[in-house]
Image: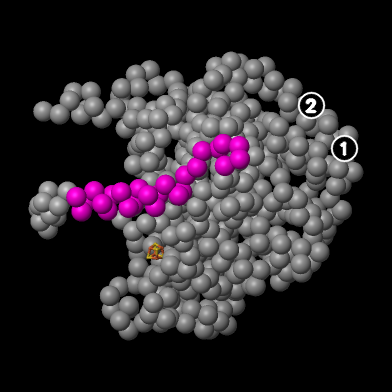
């Protein structure tokens, strides 16, 4: 088959070239360069081109992997073939004080026979087995593409299982095809949480200084750093959506005084729902980098009348890193960075890298919407390249053209960057590092950048055929 395809291409170079030109033309619409007066957003949130490798995830990945996954006492059952579960098994470094269920992955492991005759019985017995053996606070059941296609009634199975086991069993209609990327899965998860979890339990106690942090997934312990800083400010973090959270906290957090939204792409709709149903105001914040952290702390403090405490906190934290920050700024001055990441971080991080003296020459997003690109535009310098749903061919092109000193992205771009001899930094799950939020977090980030850039011989990353030539 491969041989036949090669022969076809050799005989039909014009047809092959025509397809390539057509694809490149379609991809052109997904990138822009920031030039005043020119369009501010590339084409976004449209399906990827078949045959072009994308780093995006499916709707199921967004629901299970991002929003629901970090709840530490909920057992997540993936109803589908085992392949759907692969990337959900402790991949994202959501840390948890009680991380039992973060380390486990349950699947109904549907086979051909189940696809033909239906998987409802298997799902029911899986839910009961998981509940009896592992005693979770609740169970979430995720529909995957094949389940949506064969029409298993997961709502009915969950209801029946809930009656038998006596804990909440939540159906999540997250079939991968229900959207163009993981962003649609985030929304599905938010709608499910609003329907089945929010407001189902009343809190034991509430204070005038209670907040929720919405859209914080405790990657590398960032939720814990939030709690440390906010305690010093005088606030109680009632619940974190959803990093290191417990089912009961989330079910009873509808009486807090303010919802602080950190990731403003994945979970905003849930905060909006709580505003509509429980009157909880919303504040968008960013704790990435010095400038954004100071601004956020001051706005939060103004809401609660804690301005003096905020100034004291900012001074303490900033004094603690001042001299180290100056050293890093002189090391990184003028260094160029290409970054590519999910939704909100694609613009949150521009200012954070600028705080360290780095220049962002290109940024982009797997699933950013128009408002994410608008925010990138406001933060980036003229001449910055924005690219939506980037593929590895395009990353090669960007690296060749913009000659960055480092590429910062999710894990999927690591090999492309390293194959060009460019240092790489994981800003998705942080590869053992973090937290990166706040003042101390910025120093953690600086250390990781320095480490990545200090590889003595960049040629160790260059493939042998680039150094030895092809024989
Ligand atoms: S089969 Fe569907 S749900 Fe499963 S991983 Fe693929 S796209 Fe996602």
To which residue does mark 1 refer?
307
Q: Which residue is depicted at the point 26% across and 30% down?
A: 463
Alpha carbon of mark 1 to alpha carbon of mark 2: how far?
Answer: 12 Å
Residues tagged 1 and 2 counted as in contact (Cβ below 8 A): no
Front residue (pair 219, 73): 219
Q: Quadrant of residue 415?
A: top left
The answer to whether residue 168 is left or right of residue 227 is left
Residue 306, above or below 265: above
Let me know if residue 32 is in the magenta part.
yes
**Disc 2 element:** helix
Front residue (pair 330, 33): 33
- Quadrant showing the N terminus: bottom left
Q: State yes or no: Cβ of the residue under disc 2 lies below 8 Å from any atom of ligand 1.
A: no
> From which residue to which does the magenta span run?
14-38
Q: Which residue is depicted at the point 26% across and 52% down?
A: 18
To which residue does mark 2 refer?
315
Q: Earlier in the sequence, mark 1 or mark 2?
A: 1
Residue 222, image x, y percentages:
62, 42
- Quadrant showing the C terminus: top left
């Amino acid at each position: 088959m491969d041989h036949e395809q090669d022969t076809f291409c050799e005989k039909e170079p014009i047809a092959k070239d025509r397809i390539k030109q057509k694809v490149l033309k379609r991809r052109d619409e997904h990138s822009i360069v920031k030039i005043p007066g020119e369009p501010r957003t590339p084409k976004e949130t449209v399906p990827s081109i078949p045959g072009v490798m994308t780093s995006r995830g499916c709707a199921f990945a967004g629901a299970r992997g991002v929003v629901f996954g970090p709840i530490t006492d909920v057992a997540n059952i993936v109803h589908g073939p085992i392949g759907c579960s692969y990337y959900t098994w402790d991949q994202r470094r959501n840390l948890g004080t009680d991380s039992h269920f973060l380390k486990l992955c349950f699947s109904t492991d549907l086979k051909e026979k189940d696809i033909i005759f239906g998987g409802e019985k298997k799902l029911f017995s899986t839910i009961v087995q998981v509940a009896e053996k592992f005693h979770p606070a609740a169970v979430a059941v995720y529909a995957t593409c094949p389940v949506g296609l064969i029409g298993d009634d997961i709502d009915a199975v969950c209801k029946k299982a809930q009656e038998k086991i006596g804990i909440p069993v939540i159906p999540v209609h997250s079939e991968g095809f229900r959207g163009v990327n993981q962003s649609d899965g985030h929304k599905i998860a938010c709608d499910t949480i609003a329907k089945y979890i929010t407001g189902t339990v009343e809190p034991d106690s509430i204070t005038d200084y209670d907040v929720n942090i919405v859209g914080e997934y405790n990657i590398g312990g960032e939720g814990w750093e939030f709690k440390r800083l906010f305690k010093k400010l005088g606030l109680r973090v009632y619940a974190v959506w959803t990093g290191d959270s417990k089912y009961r906290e989330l079910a009873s957090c509808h009486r807090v005084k303010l919802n602080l939204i950190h990731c403003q792409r994945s979970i905003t709709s849930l905060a909006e729902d709580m505003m509509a149903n429980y009157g909880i105001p919303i504040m968008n914040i960013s704790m990435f980098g010095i400038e954004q952290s100071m601004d956020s702390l001051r706005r939060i403090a103004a809401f609660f009348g804690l301005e003096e405490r905020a100034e004291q906190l900012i001074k303490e934290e900033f004094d603690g890193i001042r001299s180290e920050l100056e050293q890093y700024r002189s090391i990184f001055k003028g260094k160029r960075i290409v970054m590519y990441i999910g939704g909100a971080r694609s613009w949150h991080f521009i200012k954070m890298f600028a705080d360290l003296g780095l220049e962002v020459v290109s940024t982009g997003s797997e699933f950013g919407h128009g408002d994410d690109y608008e925010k990138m535009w406001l933060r980036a310098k003229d001449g910055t390249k924005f690219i939506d749903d980037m593929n590895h061919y395009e990353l090669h092109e960007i690296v060749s053209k913009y000659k960055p000193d480092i590429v910062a992205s999710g894990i999927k771009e690591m090999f492309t960057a390293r194959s060009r001899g460019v240092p790489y930094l994981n800003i998705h799950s942080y590869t053992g590092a973090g937290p990166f939020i706040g003042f101390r977090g910025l120093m953690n980030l600086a250390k990781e950048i320095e480490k990545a850039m200090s590889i003595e011989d960049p040629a160790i990353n260059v493939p042998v055929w680039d150094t030895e030539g092809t024989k």
